[in-house]
Image (cartoon, grey):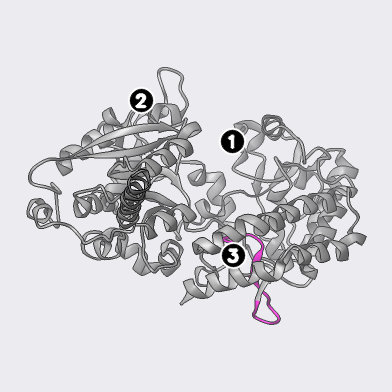
């Protein structure tokens, strides 16, 4: 009797598990007739009869704390006739809360600004938890579809190994160079003039400037919050990252055309030798590997550096001394290489918005989010409402009103604008472009610096997209792949600082090979071939 009951329990439990498995793997069949009857395919409102949706929203420290009552979404609700119930989740607990929602089956209709990475997108997309968007984008997302058609690198970056698109990303407009360049090189023009030197154009001339700052002025030649801003700036001067910086440590070997792990190349060794020389001769601030970030900003604001690779000094440090810095060009390296390769991927956050299988209005939701990839929607998202947060000049330019730029409460711009808008903090589904985005990248000092670098930026058609992986590949890369990349980072710092002599280079290369470099490259190559296809 007990055996029979036990057998029945096992059978019922097995059926339950099978049912659960099928539920996890359920396929999306498209919008229902009921939804389509209520949907306007163009124009506003999006739906005739109001609908309510529940969104899980990542709450960055800089953003508005409650999107249920904020200008941008109050206005958008009136335009669309769609009422969004926002569950605000602070960033310090977002991973935990997101995983709980995904694991419990108690899903929102969509995840917004929830920091979803490529591995999670692929995993939950294959399971059917996130719905495929390919057909919905073609039919109901004209703004986003145009971006994908105009920039295949963006389409490739968000297409998962199964061929589906499951997310709307945060995009940096490929034409907005200043935003994509991010940290950029600046030189102290006041000291350059004092020394009677021309702007450095090569790595040798940069070395000569740094040496003169130390020997003739007795000042700190180069400073930074960490050493990697300098090495990333120099990659293209030494023939490295030939396919852009979307994928750390891999590029195309210029001699063979094969995929290359460039931290074991002679070019990488030569770059390390150059940077080590700068550090060994005290041309780089000696505590760059440990400096407190606030101390670096203070030093920069005091004008204590001959050069930096960072963001606009007069915006992030001080107007007075920060104004002494001007942008530097891309440096030509010892073999004639001159390319700015380490630039931001157009896809800054791939999983900025995903729709779950609980959503009964997927087509309406796609129309809702697509608005923020068009001109009108970007204006609303980044600038707010005309007459309430911004004004338009006769020449068509737009600017925030005085009560935002000159806060009566003594608040910073970001703190004041967060009363009305939600973009501070980043990670949102939209496209950052020069016309509407008001940030450091749009500051005159930033634009001037990017103008000098833009001619040497790697072309988008040369950039490899951020690679996406199968579940098996992810598991492998989270093992030995992570170990290899961590080891490279540690040894790079040690070679530069002299903690490990470059005479141990061959041993370093052998260690990486023993850690599984061949398998690592096979996975990367398979993923690359899949996406480029």
> What's the residue at 45%, 60% (across, down)?
175
Horizontal and vertical percent position of residue 399 = 36, 39
Residue drawn at 38 percent across, 27 percent down: 65
In-image side of 478 versus 391 (left or right): right
Magenta residues (range): 243-258
160 and 238: which is toward the camera: 160
Q: Nearer the viewer, mark 1 or mark 3?
A: 3
Identify the residue under disc 2: 403
Residue farthest along the bottom direction in this orientation: 256
Regarding residue 475, the answer to whether it shows in the image is yes
State the separation of the CA atoms marked 3 and 2: 41 Å
Tell me how far mark 1 sits from mark 2, CA to CA.
Answer: 22 Å
Mark nearest the camera among 1 and 2 is: 1
Kindly identify which residue carries mark 1.
316
**SS category of the residue bearing label 2:** helix
Q: Quadrant of residue 454?
A: bottom right
| C-alpha separation, residue under disc 1 versus residue under disc 3 | 27 Å
Q: Residue at x 55, y 73 (%)?
A: 526
Badge 1: few (under 14), some or many (20 or more) residues near its Cα, within 10 Å? some
> Which one is earlier in the sequence, the residue at label 3 or at label 2?
3
Q: Is residue 94 above or below residue 30?
A: above
Residue 481 spot, x, y in % from top left: 66, 59
Q: Mark 1: which secondary structure?
A: helix
Whether 420 is drawn above or below 530: the answer is: above
| Residue 395 visible in the shown view | no
Magenta-span inclusion, residue 257: yes
Place of residue 34 in the rendered image (x, y in percent of width and height, measured from the top left): 9, 53
Q: Is residue 172 magenta?
A: no
Magenta span: predominant SS is loop
Residues under numbered marks 1 and 3 in contact, where contact means CB atoms less than 8 Å apart: no
Which residue is labeled 3 in the image?
244
Q: Which of 119 and 414 is in front in this view?
A: 119
């Amino acid at each position: 009797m007990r055996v029979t009951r036990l057998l029945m329990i096992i059978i019922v439990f097995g059926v339950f598990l099978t049912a659960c498995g099928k539920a996890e793997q359920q396929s999306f069949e498209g919008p229902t007739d009921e939804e389509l009857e209520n949907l306007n395919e163009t124009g506003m409102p999006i739906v005739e009869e109001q609908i309510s949706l529940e969104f899980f929203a990542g709450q960055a420290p800089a953003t508005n704390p409650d999107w249920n009552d904020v200008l941008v979404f109050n206005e958008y609700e009136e335009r669309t006739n769609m009422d969004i119930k926002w569950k605000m989740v602070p960033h310090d607990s977002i991973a935990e809360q997101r995983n709980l929602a995904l694991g419990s089956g108690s899903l929102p209709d969509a995840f917004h600004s929830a920091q979803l990475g490529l591995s999670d997108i692929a995993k939950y997309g294959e399971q059917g938890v996130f719905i495929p968007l390919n057909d919905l984008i073609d039919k109901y997302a004209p703004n986003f579809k145009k971006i994908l058609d105009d920039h295949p690198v963006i389409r490739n970056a968000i297409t998962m190994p199964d061929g589906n698109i499951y997310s709307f990303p945060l995009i940096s407009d490929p034409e907005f160079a200043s935003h994509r360049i991010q940290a950029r090189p600046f030189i102290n023009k006041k000291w350059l003039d004092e020394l009677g030197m021309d702007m450095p154009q090569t790595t040798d001339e940069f070395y000569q400037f740094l040496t003169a700052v130390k020997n003739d002025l007795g000042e700190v030649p180069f400073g930074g919050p960490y050493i990697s801003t300098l090495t990333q700036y120099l990659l293209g001067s030494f023939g490295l990252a030939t396919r852009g910086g979307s994928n750390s440590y891999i590029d195309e070997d210029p001699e063979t055309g094969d995929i290359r792990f460039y931290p074991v190349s002679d070019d990488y060794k030569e770059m390390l030798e150059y940077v080590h020389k700068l550090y060994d001769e005290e041309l780089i601030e000696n505590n760059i590997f440990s400096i407190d970030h606030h101390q670096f900003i203070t030093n920069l604001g005091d004008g204590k550096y001959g050069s930096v690779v960072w963001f606009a000094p007069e915006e992030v440090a001080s107007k007075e001394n920060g104004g002494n810095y001007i942008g530097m060009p891309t440096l030509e390296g010892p073999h004639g290489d001159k390319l700015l390769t380490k630039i931001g991927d157009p896809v800054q956050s791939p999983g900025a918005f995903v729709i779950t299988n609980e959503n009964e209005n997927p087509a309406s939701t796609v129309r809702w989010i697509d608005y923020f990839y068009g001109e009108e929607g970007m204006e609303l998202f980044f600038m707010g409402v005309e007459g309430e947060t911004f004004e338009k000049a006769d020449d068509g330019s737009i600017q925030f009103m005085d009560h935002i730029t000159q806060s009566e409460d003594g608040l910073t711009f970001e703190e004041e604008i967060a009363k009305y808008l939600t973009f501070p903090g980043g990670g949102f589904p939209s496209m950052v472009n020069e016309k509407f985005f008001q940030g450091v990248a749009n500051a005159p000092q930033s634009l001037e610096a990017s103008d000098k670098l833009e001619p040497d930026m790697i072309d988008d058609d040369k950039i490899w997209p951020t690679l996406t992986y199968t579940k098996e590949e992810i598991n492998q890369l989270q093992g030995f792949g992570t170990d290899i990349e961590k080891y490279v980072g540690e040894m790079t710092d040690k070679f530069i600082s002299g903690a490990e002599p470059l005479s141990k280079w061959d041993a370093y290369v052998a260690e990486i090979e023993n850690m599984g470099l061949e398998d690592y490259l096979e996975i990367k190559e398979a993923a690359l071939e899949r996406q480029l296809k």
